[in-house]
Every structure is written in C-alpha cells, then in structure tokens.
Image (cartoon, helix red, strand yellow):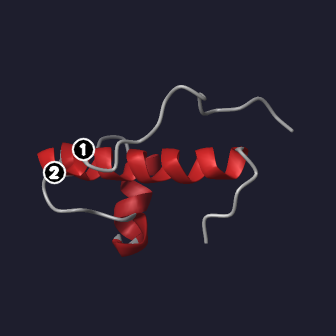
Amino acid sequence: MAERLTRPSVDVDQTASRYMDGEVKIQDLGDGVLELILNGPTINGVKKDTLRHLVRQLYAELKVYEEGGNNG
C-alpha cells in the first residue's frame, strides 16, 4: 500500500459543521463545480465553507478507506 495520506491522530469532528453554512456533500455538486475546484485557474465564487465541507468529507472517507474499513 502507498504511504498514508491521513494521520492517526487527526479525526474529522462531525460537530464542527455547526460553525459553517449548510452542509455540502460532494455528491450534491455538479460536474462543472467540481471541475472548477479541482482544475480551474481560480476558485473565486466558491464559498470557503463549501471547500471545508468537501475537504472534511473526503478526509473522513479516505481515513476509513486507509484503515481498511468500508464506508458504504
């Protein structure tokens, strides 16, 4: 297996989203928005809370994967 990207001592606090705008899930975003975030020259117009939700979701799911679990 490749080197881990997640860290054992870092977990996603599921209650932290209370400090952000409404929950955003990667499954809810259109292809154009994901393309812009991943490959665009700038991400102007994409809210910081949206990016934080996506990073938290991806990190949590990646950590489960790296630990050999099944997240759905």
Q: What secondary structure is marked by label 2?
A: helix
Q: Label 1 crowding class (10 Å Cα cut-off): few <14, some 14-19, many 20+?
A: few
The residue at which mark 1 appears reads as: 16
The residue sitting at 64% across, 32% down in the picture is 5
Gap in Å between the C-alphas at discs 1 and 2? 5 Å
Report if the CB atoms under discs 1 and 2 are less than 8 Å apart: yes
Residue that extends furthest to the right in the rendered view of this protein: 1
Give the amino acid type for the residue marked by disc 2 in the picture: Arg
Between 69 and 22, the one lying in front of the other is 69
Q: Is residue 62 left or right of residue 48?
A: right
**Height in image: 9 above or below 26?**
above
Tell me if 49 is positioned left or right of 61 in this view: left
Label number found at residue 32: none
Q: Position of residue 71 (x, y in %)?
A: 61, 64
Report the quarter where the C terminus lies: bottom right
How many residues crowd around disc 2 within 10 Å: few (fewer than 14), some, or many (20 or more)?
A: few
Q: Quadrant of residue 69?
A: bottom right
Q: For the point 31% across and 51% down, which residue is it?
A: 53
Q: Amino acid at mark 1?
A: Ala
Residue 47 screen position, x and y as percent: 18, 49
Say which mark, if any, is on residue 18: 2
Residue 30, percent across and down?
A: 37, 73
| Front-most of residues 63 and 32 | 63
Q: For the point 60% across and 33% down, which residue is it?
A: 6
Q: Relative to 8, is 54 above or below?
A: below
Side of 30 where 22 appears, left or right: left
